[in-house]
Amino acid sequence: MTVLTETFNLDACLVNARRASRQLAAADRNGALYKIADALETHGAEIVRANAEDVKAERLKGTKEALIDRLTLTPERVEAMADAVRLVTKLPDPLNRIYEGWTLENGLRVQKVAVPFGVIGMIYESRPNVTVDAATLALKAGSAAVLRGSSNALNSNRVLVRVMREAIQSADLPKDAIQLVDSPDRELVTQLLSARGNVDLVIPRGGESLIQHVVQNAKVPTIETGTGNCHIFVDASADLQKAKNIIVNAKVQRPGVCNSAETLLVHKDVVASFLPDALGELSSQGVSLNADEHTREHFPDANVATETDWETEYLDYTLAVKVVDSVDEAIEHITIYGTQHSEAIVTSDMQNARKFQQQIDAAAVFVNASTRFTDGFAFGFGAEIGISTQKLHARGPMGLAEIVTYKYLIEGEGQIRD
Amino acid sequence: MTVLTETFNLDACLVNARRASRQLAAADRNGALYKIADALETHGAEIVRANAEDVKAERLKGTKEALIDRLTLTPERVEAMADAVRLVTKLPDPLNRIYEGWTLENGLRVQKVAVPFGVIGMIYESRPNVTVDAATLALKAGSAAVLRGSSNALNSNRVLVRVMREAIQSADLPKDAIQLVDSPDRELVTQLLSARGNVDLVIPRGGESLIQHVVQNAKVPTIETGTGNCHIFVDASADLQKAKNIIVNAKVQRPGVCNSAETLLVHKDVVASFLPDALGELSSQGVSLNADEHTREHFPDANVATETDWETEYLDYTLAVKVVDSVDEAIEHITIYGTQHSEAIVTSDMQNARKFQQQIDAAAVFVNASTRFTDGFAFGFGAEIGISTQKLHARGPMGLAEIVTYKYLIEGEGQIRD
């Protein structure tokens, strides 16, 4: 007899998730979320213990401290996760909203109403808080969540998912609405990405290679998230103090995230008045600068930039710098090298501001503000499941409204088509 | 020297389409559409002549008359195409609409505005009118169209695309906003489906195998359209005259389309009072019936249905018939066999109507009306690029509003993130 205990059955997982999902729209989803928050606190010590095993294994592998930090759960972080779940209960229900409604000439009443996707798959990396985030946002939006975290967080994720499943069951919701792909086997990712009809949407969250793997291989509907090669363009008419504040904020406030700035473009007219001061400040805050020749004439400490620098999402204390002749050249540069995430112009010229907003093809186009604001929380959505860099379905920060779909309800008195 | 004259360069086509697309949002798109309509009429004879070559080639292959008819263009059909384009000019502009706008506590103004996709690919079968339909709807929505029709319509499509390109150029729009993938090479479909970054959306339109090929192989965002295994459920409390009208309409008014009915489900309480009459009428209109045993007790002329019948989208004068014990059994059957397209209940019981609408997971759920109304024109959209059977981005009929995307425009006075 073949021993199959190690084999995770994804088909069964998805079928069970589908069955469970049917009960969610009409269930007390907020009640279940409160139970999850409480259970995370009650089981805090157990969660931290399981996480310590994952952290220990990573330390033995010699993993970098920054990644260890992203993996680590402390009692405070578990507390913060529980609090975040309680905040989700306060958000408006994204379901059962009527987007539009009208009556046709033949008397048919048509309503376009928000309904759940059904089964949402999440494929993500290290951070175990995404496990709770994704499951609870999907639940709030009436969908079952099938979670595929990274294998180095498997102990943490097992406990987190078990605790959440027990919690929703205690609230009379089907526990299969939250499921972990409980195996490090990468073949299961391929299976999940091919499960047409059994999963309605897969969202990747993580680094560039994870996201590219998902969008290149998915046969199911998916949303590209992530890569942000974001630019700040300082126009000739910019308020230079504000411009300095914005580039410093966009670069150093949190360099490792997708909405931080990677390239500074500066109008030739303000090179002398802006660059030495701004680059001096960035340099003093630990930013390494890769600049074109024109910039280096005014700030010789900068390294020589190559073509690669214009293309790179550093996600680090590094910034590319280039002087341009006009707003048109800035737009052209961003059109070539940008990743359609977040782009900003600093200007007092409203014609240039308008041109930049119209011609830049990106999810978020800023005038006189930091690109760091491209974020579900900063936008006031109260939650964020990811930031879309594609144009289908959702663009930019995705909150609860972006993880529901709709259907048409049509009512008549026997109408038939001519 | 290698002869490359036969090789179609898709990369160049897409790059040119992208460049052209940037000019469309601000251009006089309606003016260009009028020019297209006029040009189709002016070149009517030439179009019909080119089409006659395609038709002749198909006749020599022994193609079925129904398919020949779909391929054929007559002077009247060219006229109808031109009129359809003029109607598109009358529709509201789907661009530059502000979906939402709000001010954050820090003073940032956020606007969510409708913008074009950019480059939309269409992969479709026989009917050459789709060439004009797709190009003009994309143009109205501010996107360039890259058209891949079927090889048996290549002569027709060549002339149609040439005429449209000349027309928009005469209206000062870039002709590369409309392009034909001018080659029968199937490898180009694979290339188009893999052109991430160069095409923003690919929409398939055609039969089941075309659509499955596209959605299974696309690495670019795509929308599944099409398959409709639609059901009419006649409940115990149904007005039986209306029920008969609805099933007859949904089956025979146009059997070859995706929103026609394929299976009739009948509540056991109305078997004797409804089935002989309704099935007699369907039979007299040429519908072949494949029924379960219970139905055959009351209508012995029906054939014996097998499992396959519940799964089949006949697209023909054939109907599967089954008796069910309750609305719950009807919902269960539809959940198993339906394709999430269009489903209808005929009932006077508003609780059952509500249950059916809530529990059926489909793009359009009808109460007391024919499924044939799932259509962009019937819904009042004034146009239709296809009917989505997926949940991402659009569901059900897709009009102009469904082939645009959005971006966020954010304006401030130097705001930075804490």
Image: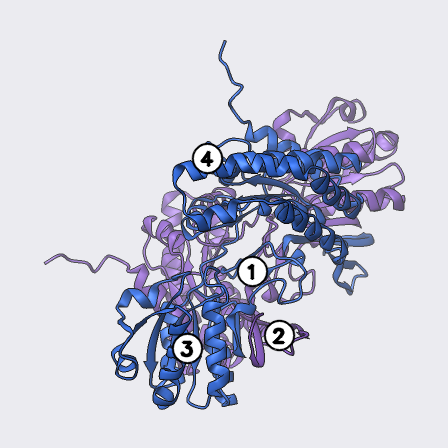
Chain colours: A purple, B blue
Dot 3 corresponds to which residue? B281
Dot 2 corresponds to which residue? A111
Which of discs 3 and 1 lies nearer the camera? The answer is: 3
Residue A314 at x, y percent in the picture: 60, 38
At mark 1, the secondary structure is loop
Residues at marks 3 and 2, common chain?
Answer: no
From what the image shows, is residue B327 above or below residue A58?
below
Dot 4 corresponds to which residue? B57
Tell me the chain of label 4. Answer: B
Q: Residues within 10 Å of mark 4 (few under 14, many from 20)?
A: some
Three-letter amino acid code of the residue under disc 4 = Ala
Three-letter amino acid code of the residue under disc 1 = Ile
Which of discs 2 and 1 lies nearer the camera? The answer is: 2
Distance between the alpha carbons at the discs numbered 3 and 2: 32 Å
Tell me which numbered mark, 3 or 4, is placed earlier along the sequence: 4
Badges 3 and 1: C-beta atoms under 8 Å apart?
A: no
At mark 4, the secondary structure is helix
Q: Residues within 10 Å of mark 1 (few under 14, many from 20)?
A: many
Residue A233 at x, y percent in the picture: 78, 39
Distance between the alpha carbons at the discs numbered 2 and 1: 27 Å
Which of discs 3 and 2 lies nearer the camera? The answer is: 3
Measuring 64% from the left and 24% from the top, which residue is drawn there? Answer: A306
Distance between the alpha carbons at the discs numbered 3 and 4: 40 Å
From what the image shows, is residue A355 above or below residue B325?
above
